[in-house]
Image (spheres, rainbow, N blue to C red):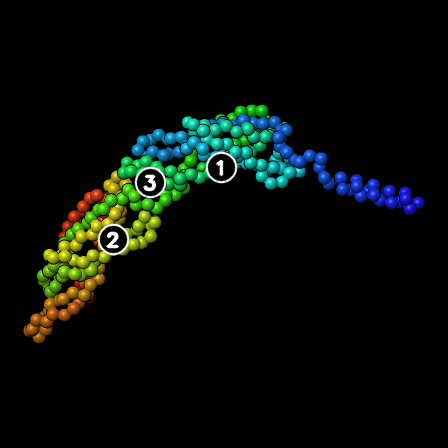
């Protein structure tokens, strides 16, 4: 009796163990395939209206939930295609017999020095999520276009540009004078990282103010700058019949707004500070 009972228990244990171990791994290799081909484009030369081919070697990813292929499988099924010469790619993707499979297409980002009229601009380009519906044993053409994701901050193509003007202020009732030499004037602008930056310069003889900073060229729309100042300047007035000079506050108000261009000089009309305050 004991032998029979032991044998029966062992048989149950072995059967139980084999029940949960598949004889071969889950695979989509045996499924029928759909073929997807196409050309991948990107705007790499902004001096013309045409699109160029995406760089050779760029990787494309084709994805679907594995359960769309094999009901018991989990995770993502991913197929890869590499962009070849002339932007061409081709990939085979497994499809269950029922077909009507939606495949998500993405691409690896790439960095490229995009050509512009003023030189080059370094950009990150991306392929945003796209989809295609496929059936087994059919072929499809899907052209893809990369778009700008962001510009990598650089001033490599910026050149020195300058802006100058003459600055006066009302130094007494009814008359104006040049702002004194050494008075600080501030210029504010957004730098290549879009962060607010400022530089200061001192007024020169005869009220001359001049700023020189790096800026994009005219064809790239230049750089908008704002010029401002609050300063204590000598002001003459008459008190009890006697002339008195005292320090009073004057401002560039409203602030001067202008566009500065690389490799160019902008001369503004004469400017006058407001005050005294």
Question: Could you tell me which secondary element the residue under label 2 belongs to?
Answer: strand
Q: Give the left or right position of residue 165, taking residue 45 as reference.
A: left
Residue depicted at 25% across the width and 47% down the height: 214
Outermost residue, bottom direction? 240
Please count the marks in the image.
3
Q: Give the mark nearer the N terminus: 3 vs 2.
A: 3
Q: Nearer the viewer, mark 3 or mark 1?
A: 3
Kind of element beneath mark 3: strand
What residue sits 91% from the left and 46% below the top? 2
| Marks 3 and 2 close (CB-CB < 8 Å) | no
Instruction: Give the residue number, with chain letter if any, for mark 2.
Output: 226
Residue 34 against residue 204 in the figure, above or below: above
Q: Residues within 10 Å of mark 1 (few under 14, many from 20)?
A: some
As drawn, is 252 to the left or to the right of 71? left
Report the quarter where the C terminus lies. Answer: bottom left
Residue at screen point 17% across, 54% down: 209
Q: Earlier in the sequence, mark 1 or mark 2?
A: 1
From where the camera sits, is residue 231 visible? yes
- Left or right of 56: which side holds 276? left
Pair 3/2: label in front: 3
**Which of the two labelled residues, at mark 3 and mark 1, occupies the earlier sequence position?**
1
In front here: 44 or 233?
A: 44
* Label 3 – label 2 distance at C-alpha: 25 Å
Residue 197, x across and y down, in percent:
29, 54
The x, y position of residue 63, in whole percent, is 55, 36
> Distance between the Cα atoms at labels 1 and 2?
43 Å
Question: Tag on residue 106?
Answer: 1
- Residue 143 visible within the image: no
Quadrant in the rendering for residue 49: top left
Q: Which mark is residue 121?
A: 3
């Amino acid at each position: 009796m004991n032998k029979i009972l032991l044998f029966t228990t062992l048989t149950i244990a072995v059967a139980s163990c084999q029940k949960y171990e598949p004889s071969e791994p889950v695979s989509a290799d045996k499924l029928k395939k759909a073929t997807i081909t196409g050309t991948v484009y990107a705007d790499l030369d902004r001096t013309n209206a045409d699109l160029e081919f995406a760089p050779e070697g760029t990787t494309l990813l084709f994805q679907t939930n594995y359960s769309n292929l094999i009901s018991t499988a989990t995770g993502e099924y991913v197929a890869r295609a590499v962009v070849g010469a002339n932007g061409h790619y081709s990939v085979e993707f497994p499809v269950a017999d029922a077909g009507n499979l939606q495949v998500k297409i993405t691409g690896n980002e790439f960095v490229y020095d995009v050509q512009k009229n003023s030189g080059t601009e370094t950009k990150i380009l991306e392929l945003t999520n796209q989809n295609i519906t496929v059936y087994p044993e059919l072929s499809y053409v899907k052209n893809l276009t990369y778009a700008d994701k962001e510009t990598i901050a650089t001033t490599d193509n910026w050149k020195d540009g300058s802006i100058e003007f003459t600055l006066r202020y009302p130094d007494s009732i009814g008359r104006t004078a040049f702002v004194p030499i050494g008075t600080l004037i501030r210029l504010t602008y957004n730098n290549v990282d879009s962060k607010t930056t400022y530089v200061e310069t001192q007024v020169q003889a005869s009220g001359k103010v001049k700023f020189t900073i790096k800026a994009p060229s005219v064809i790239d729309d230049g750089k908008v700058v704002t010029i401002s100042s609050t300063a204590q300047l000598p002001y003459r007035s008459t008190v009890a019949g006697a002339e008195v000079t005292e320090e009073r506050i004057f401002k560039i108000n409203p602030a001067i707004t202008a566009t500065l261009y690389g490799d160019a000089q902008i001369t503004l009309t004469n400017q006058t500070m407001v005050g005294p305050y």
